[in-house]
Amino acid sequence: MKYDEYYEKLNQIQLLISISNTGSPKDLAKTLNVSERTTRRLVQKLKKQNVPIQYSRKNKSYVLKK
């Protein structure tokens, strides 16, 4: 994945998380057109950048921690 594509995917994830509409990691991977593993790596990258993300089983989506 190219540098600009990588950061575009990170921005897409952040937008989807802000509206609690990512779905499961598998759904998010389909939305981003990447593998599920890549999706998990992108989420980990955001967490390392101190973005307060967690997966909500109730909402079946990644959400921002409160």
Image (tube, rainbow, N blue to C red):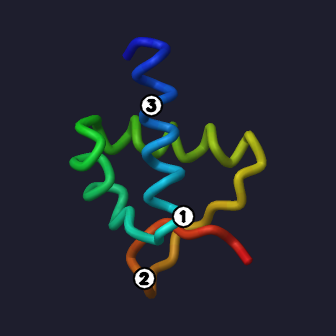
Residue topped by disc 2: 59
Image quarter where the N terminus lies is: top left
Q: Is residue 46 left or right of residue 36?
A: right
Q: Of the residues under marks 2 and 3, which one precedes in the sequence?
A: 3
Point out the tag, 3 or 1, that comes first from the N-terminus.
3
In the image, taking residue 44 as reference, residue 29 lies left or right, namely: left
> On the image, numbered disc 1 is attached to which residue?
18
What residue sits right under mark 3 in the picture?
Answer: 8
What is the CA distance from the residue labelled 2 to the residue labelled 3?
25 Å
Q: Position of residue 25 (x, y in %)?
A: 36, 57
What residue occupies the far top of the structure in this picture? 2
Q: CA distance from mark 1 to mark 2?
A: 13 Å
Rendering coords of residue 13 (x, y %): 46, 49
Give whichever of 57, 13 is nearer the camera: 13
Residue plotted at (38% across, 68% down): 21
List x then y, in percent, for residue 32: 30, 42
In primary-sequence order, the first of circles 1 and 2 is 1
